[in-house]
Image (cartoon, rainbow, N blue to C red):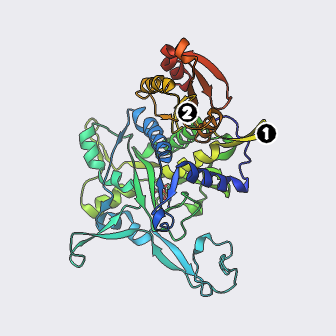
Amino acid sequence: MASNSAVPNDETLFEKVVNLSKRRGFVFQSADIYGGFRSTYDYGPIGVLLLRNVKEQWWRTMVQMRHDVVGLDASILSPPSVWEASGHLANFSDPLVDCRECGARHRQDKLDNPEVCPSCEKEGTLTEARQFNLMFKTHAGPMVESAAEVYLRPETAQGMFINFANVLNTSRKKPPFGIAQIGKSFRNEITPGNFVFRTREFEQMEMEFFVPPDESDQWYRHWCEARMAWYRELGMPDDRLRLREHEADELSHYSSATADVEFLFPWGWDELEGIANRSDFDLNQHAEHSGARLEYHDPGSGERYVPHVIEPAAGATRTAMAFLMAAYDEEQVNDDVRTVLRLDPRLAPYKVAVLPLSKKAELIEPSTEVLGLLQPHWMCDYDQTQAIGRRYRRQDEIGTPFCVTIDFDTLDDQAVTVRERDSMSQQRVPISDLVDHLSTRLGA
Ligand code: GAP
């Protein structure tokens, strides 16, 4: 991502990114034609590509590029026993207060002043806090009365803990090793908001790294550094990214250390990912509740131990939004303001757009051929409407790194114009060299 001239905390940045998301098909309000279902969102044709790319980059770094991490795709529905053992049934709740005056609901722990309702600004109108469990409950089976209660997972992590023995027995891994998963999680948030930042249905990218107990500090530091490097390497600017270590009073009783990767959103610093040293808490809990033996037995030394766990837990949907905000830029070009998403090419929804200069039939055929040449390599857009300048701007707005224009000279010289998003520079390239040329410039 090149330098971003939009002021990070510019209040309008949030609105601009939300508007762009709706206008260009990144994100739509869910059930839009029925008036919208509050705080749930659908990812449109461009957004689904960005989100896939964020997840693919995470998977590549966390699984593909490591010999010590394997993947998993666990079920979303699970029985109460899992959540009893994990502590979610008893503890996964937020303190909820109602305003007697205006009826607004708030999370007490997020109020600036616990005596004042932030909606109507009246003092002394808030009720006592009630604990509100954030898990969604439903029923498995046709008859609600006799059906089993099940929960939609509020995090993907428990899938990794309850499959620890399965993976250990089948993968030939031994600590230190990790199990990684990307998938949907559900939380009945009291105060969803800030667009896709906090929603009731979202995607997580989590990894549980099982280590010998005496190596947990060293691995915790390793993962803090590795996760920060991932964001930086994909173009998050240094001045909008930080690692914040939790204070002792923020830590859960079983965690010896936790840090948040935070991004400077338009409303201030907020969490993208948590990295926690979870000790042997989760494996012990599930061993105790299930009766299963969740430990590692070293066949060489005969040693048995319950591994400790380092967990980097990130939000995919939240991270995609942060990359959008970091990439959003506006620059003056002659009398015009150009909006450009300076996304790293690996995250860009389309890598290349193929644009015939005119809709005339003689240009459509070679354009379709060029498109066919590029599609096996990259996600490509194709657009033959409007003036070419406006089409370039449309591609800039969704972050497409390269536009390939087929013009009337192409019919003679078998070459096309390659236009680069950030510099807007143009270069004539023979069609026969096009795939190599773009591969070099895209770095893939
Ligand atoms: N297993 C640990 C765990 O789930 P978490 O901090 O509650 O930790 C991890 O969640 C990440 O998931 C967060 O850093 C955030 O990016 C994302 N996340 C959590 N709740 C979310 C929500 N309601 N909407 C969108 N993303 C959320």
Could you classify mark 1 by the number of other residues whose Cα lies within 10 Å: few (under 14), some (14-19), or many (20 or more)?
few
> x%, y% of residue 241?
64, 45
Numbered disc in front, either 2 or 1:
1
Quarter that holds the N terminus: top right
Q: Residue at x 68, y 75 (%)?
A: 113
Q: Is residue 194 above or below residue 226?
A: below
How many marks the image carries: the answer is 2
Task: State left or right for residue 248 relative to residue 130.
Answer: right
Q: Is residue 311 above or below residue 359?
A: below
Q: Is residue 396 above or below residue 407?
A: below
**Label 1 beta carbon within 8 A of ligand 1:** no
Mark 2 = which residue? Answer: 345
**Label 2 beta carbon within 8 A of ligand 1:** no
> x%, y% of residue 196?
54, 57
| Residue in the foreground of this view, choosing between 257 and 274 | 274
Q: Secondary structure at mark 2?
A: loop
Q: Are marks 2 and 1 in contact (CB under 8 Å)?
A: no
Determine which quarter of the picture holds residue 115.
Answer: bottom right
Task: State left or right for residue 217 relative to residue 418.
Answer: left
- Asked if residue 80 shows in the view, the reply is yes
> x%, y% of residue 352?
52, 30
Mark 1 = which residue? Answer: 335
| Residue in the foreground of this view, choosing between 373 and 42 | 373
Amino acid type at image mark 2? Pro
| Residue in the foreground of this view, choosing between 238 and 394 | 394
Instruction: Tell which circle, 2 or 1, labels the residue nearer the N-terminal end.
Output: 1
